[in-house]
Amino acid sequence: MSEATIRPRVGILISGRGSNMVSLVEAARAPGYPAEIALVLSNVPGAPGLERARDFGIATATVDHRAFNKDREAFERAMDDVLRVNQIDLVVLAGFMRIMTPWFVRRWEGRMINIHPSLLPLFKGTHTHRQALEAGVAEHGCSVHFVVPELDAGPVIAQAKVPVLAGDDEDTLASRVLVEEHRLYPIALAEVAAGRAALVDGAVVRR
């Protein structure tokens, strides 16, 4: 990538410790990475990931969802204002524990991605590792997908698989998947930021 290339500005949304956020920030510091991590935004004041972002020298912001009297769209409009003020081009969800309204999803359609700890379309929602163990599958993993109004239903950009081992419990399986999340998410973000993967008519188009 030439020095003249303008990299898309990425806003990462978190609710907690931000381990995937850290993997994205570290990847984006490499020469030639096609995106700039410009903002980390949380709905939880004091989320540990905010301090980690500040340690990297990244701008941070908080929009506390509890201040909006359960008005989800008002909360999201406040977030959207922060994203626009910071000139964000792409939104990345990294452990952001709020379900988006159709308004916000439409606002960022094709420019918002999420990572989910299962091989979608298997095991949507929460407790995915428990779901995988109860289903007796031989493989589990994680998926990066574009966000659409239906929960965990967006077109998949990339996936990574791990074996389910004899004796696995939720914690051991989750830790193995998390390693792959940290590897996969920067790769998928680079594909989107560079225009090599795009959402077109409800499907991922490779360019």
Image: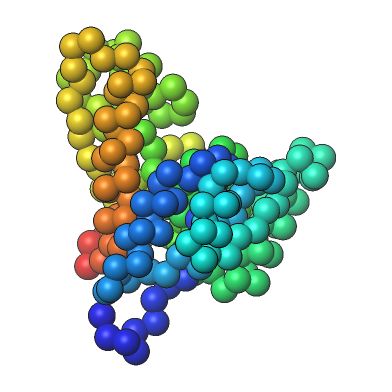
Residue toward you, 39 or 138: 39
- The image shows residue 106, relative to residue 193, as above or below, that is above
Residue pictured at 58% horizontal, 65% vertical:
59
- The image shows residue 158, relative to residue 139, as above or below, that is below
Image check: 193 left or right of 69? Answer: left
Q: Quadrant of residue 107?
A: bottom right
Residue 10 visible in this rendered orientation of the protein? no
Residue 19 visible in this rendered orientation of the protein? yes
Quadrant (top left, top right, bottom left, bottom right) of the C terminus: bottom left
Residue pictured at 53% horizontal, 65% vertical:
58
Residue toward you, 17 or 108: 17
Where is residue 197 drawn, in percent x and y? 29, 61
Image check: 177 left or right of 161? Answer: right
Residue toward you, 13 or 171: 171
Q: How many marks?
A: 0
Where is residue 130 drawn, in percent x and y? 37, 16
Residue toward you, 170 or 202: 170
Q: How is the image coloured?
A: rainbow
Q: Residue furthest front?
A: 55
Where is residue 127 drawn, in percent x and y? 44, 22
Residue pictured at 39% horizontal, 82% vertical:
6
Quadrant (top left, top right, bottom left, bottom right) of the N terminus: bottom left
Where is residue 167 drawn, in percent x and y? 23, 10
Residue pictured at 51% horizontal, 52% vertical:
52
